[in-house]
Image (cartoon, rainbow, N blue to C red):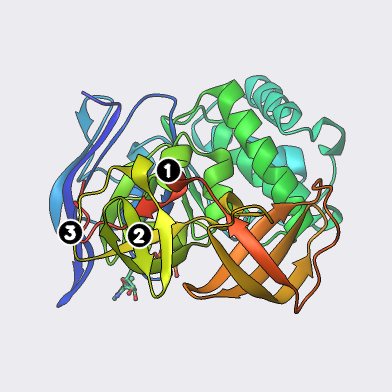
Amino acid sequence: MSYLQLSNISKHFDEYVAVDNISLSVEKGEFISLLGPSGCGKTTTLQMVAGFLNPTAGSIVLDGKNITAMKPSERGLGIVFQKYALFPHMTVLENVAFGLEMRKVGKNERLQRAREALELVHLGLFIERYPRQLSGGQQQRVALARALVINPHLLLLDEPLSNLDAKLREDMQLELHDIQRRVGTTTIMVTHDQSEALAVSDRIAVMQSGRIEQIDKPFNVYEHPKSDFVSSFLGKTNTFEGRVSHGRLQVGGQHIAVDDLKLADSSNTRFALRPEKIRFCSDAPKISGKVSNRVFLGSQWIYEVQTPLGDFLIYESNNQKHDEIQEGETVGLSWDSQDMRLIAEEPASHV
Ligand code: ATP
């Protein structure tokens, strides 16, 4: 059995179904993200694991123990919320040691363990400061140290980086990833930020309307999304429709060779193509179009190109050596056929 097992968990608020029959297995040491749009049931799921909400149905088993009806304080979990809620009148060290005091750990041991936890999050030099004397990122790390110091069975993170600015957030994503790997604490993080989930997780559970649409490794969720929803929630996707006939895709007046996709002749079929899979080419392009917009983001360019298949979004890294492409220019576009993903018509299965 998995270290943490959620079995057929539901949560109803009166008539409203916030979480709808979710099952989820988490292995010891794994970092799982619950990712999805606002209102999809991520926080409600986390709160049921934490014990702040009782499930309407289903069970939660942690390390072989059924904890479904256990009080939050009996579950031995470390929790970091969006608002860190550090005690303003306590130093950083006292803030981190507080949870151990509540657990009746002796003074010397709790100060020693609090120091070690603060070293872990690179705050060893800040232990005598008060929270108001710290930056947002440092406060966030104190909250993490406070959650980790009790050696929790499970670390629960609810949008822990959402108060940080973009640069700090990126740095903290790498740090969170590194700290969790070093400590090895099984972790569940709620986020609506797809790049955050991709950066830190062993597996991502993509949620929609109280259900898990797909759960898999970040690469697989991105490259092999099970549904249109997962595909469009994790990054941008160009979609277009066409009819396959004799190994060629007919879209409007265009014919695109797709032999290597081994598609059966069929009626209309929808395809998805990630913007970074498309390249500019002058020789034998798959389609041509006119550049309607371009944006420079430092490491990459983003282009919008109007084509007979519809408007295409194209990401190109900033190390391409061709002449600069201008707005209004007519360009040829190409891609590998195997990068086109057939959009499944059947509804996504639920895990
Ligand atoms: P966000 O990213 O905005 O925090 P979320 O995915 O975490 O969203 P939840 O907070 O789990 O979403 O809420 C799921 C749904 O349940 C929402 O539609 C919300 O309005 C509803 N909900 C949550 N708590 C309650 C409550 N106490 N009473 C009634 N409805 C609730």
Q: Crowding at label 1, few (<14), some or many (≥20) Cα neighbours within 10 Å? A: few
Q: Disc 3 marks which residue?
A: 346
In the displayed structure, 140 sits above or below 76; it is below
Instruction: Give x and y (percent) for residue 341.
Output: 38, 51
Question: What residue sits 73% from the left and 32% below the top?
Answer: 118
- Could you tell me which secondary element the residue under label 3 belongs to? loop
Question: What label does residue 338 carry, if any?
Answer: 1
Question: What residue sits 72% from the left and 33% below the top?
Answer: 121
Mark 2 and mark 1 in contact? Answer it, CB < 8 Å.
Answer: no
Q: Crowding at label 3, few (<14), some or many (≥20) Cα neighbours within 10 Å? A: few
Q: Is residue 66 left or right of residue 237?
A: left
- Depth check: 249 or 186 in front? 249
Q: Nearer the viewer, mark 1 or mark 3?
A: 1
Q: Is residue 299 left or right of residue 269?
A: right
Q: Is residue 158 visible?
A: yes
Q: Is residue 77 left or right of residue 64?
A: right
Distance of label 1 from label 3 (alpha carbons): 21 Å
- Could you tell me which secondary element the residue under label 1 belongs to? helix
Say what amino acid the circle numbered 3 marks: Glu
Q: Is residue 139 visible?
A: no
Say what amino acid the circle numbered 1 marks: Gln
Mark 3 and mark 2 in contact? Answer it, CB < 8 Å.
Answer: no
Distance of label 3 from label 2 (alpha carbons): 21 Å
In the displayed structure, 195 sits above or below 184; it is below
Q: Earlier in the sequence, mark 3 or mark 2?
A: 2
Q: Disc 2 marks which residue?
A: 249
Instruction: Give x and y (percent) for residue 304.
Output: 64, 72
Q: Earlier in the sequence, mark 2 or mark 1?
A: 2
Q: Nearer the viewer, mark 3 or mark 2?
A: 2
